[in-house]
């Protein structure tokens, strides 16, 4: 019985570690989605602003330079590891929106995995709680049989 409880404790700890890892991954996904949404909002804002308007563009964390908005026909987007592609404005927006959808779909998969792990933990807890009850029933039956 004691070994069984220890094994169950170890299994619960392993499940909790997996849950923590999945939550961390969800946090990274959320940060990426927020960045992509910010990129969408910025592109749309620049397009709305129109050509010839002056904007301040950050250069590093403490400096900005003044620039004029030119044509917003083309946008260069990252499409992979250190690979960028020039896309038409509308195509770039769609690409970013599709990336957000993919990340949110993956987020759902991770959330489902977390729910499954919690269900496994609940099953283990139920198993531990049932074991003493079953032992009591067996002891009572043994006592009746011995009399």
Image (tube, rainbow, N blue to C red):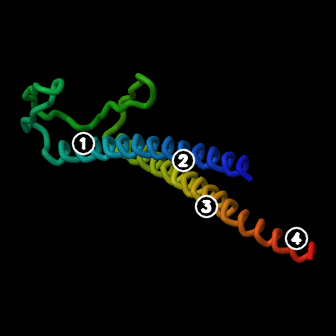
Q: CA distance from mark 3 to mark 2?
A: 12 Å
Q: Disc 3 on helix, strand or loop?
A: helix
Foreground of the two, 21 or 132: 132
Location of residue 104 with respect to 21 vertically, above or below: below
The C terminus is located in which quarter?
bottom right
Q: Disc 1 on helix, strand or loop?
A: helix
Give the residue at mark 1: 43
Q: How many marks?
A: 4
Q: Nearer the viewer, mark 1 or mark 2?
A: 2
Q: Earlier in the sequence, mark 4 or mark 3?
A: 3
Give the residue at mark 2: 16
Foreground of the two, 7 or 52: 7
Q: Disc 2 on helix, strand or loop?
A: helix
Foreground of the two, 108 or 134: 134
Q: Disc 4 on helix, strand or loop?
A: helix
- Decide if residue 24 is on the left or right side of residue 74: right
Q: Residue at x 55, y 43 (%)?
A: 18
Tell me if mark 2 has few (under 14), some (14-19) or many (20+) residues whose alpha carbon lies within 10 angstroms of its own. some
Q: Earlier in the sequence, mark 3 or mark 2?
A: 2
Give the residue at mark 3: 122
Answer whether labels 4 and 2 touch (C-beta < 8 Å).
no
Q: Residue at x 31, y 47 (%)?
A: 37
Q: CA distance from mark 1 to mark 2?
A: 40 Å
Give the residue at mark 4: 142
Q: Position of residue 64 (x, y in %)?
A: 10, 27
């Amino acid at each position: 019985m004691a070994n069984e409880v220890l094994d169950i404790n170890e299994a619960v700890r392993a499940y909790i570690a997996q849950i923590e890892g999945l939550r961390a991954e969800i946090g990274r996904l959320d940060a990426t989605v927020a960045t992509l949404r910010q990129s969408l909002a910025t592109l749309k804002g620049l397009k709305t602003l129109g050509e010839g308007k002056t904007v301040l563009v950050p250069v590093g964390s403490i400096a900005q330079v003044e620039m004029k908005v030119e044509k917003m026909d083309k946008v260069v987007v990252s499409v992979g590891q250190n690979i960028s592609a020039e896309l038409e404005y509308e195509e770039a927006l769609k690409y970013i929106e599709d990336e957000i959808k993919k990340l949110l779909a993956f987020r759902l998969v991770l959330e489902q995995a977390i729910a499954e792990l919690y269900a496994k933990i609940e099953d283990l807890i139920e198993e531990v709680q049932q074991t003493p009850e079953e032992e009591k029933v067996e002891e009572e039956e043994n006592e009746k049989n011995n009399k």
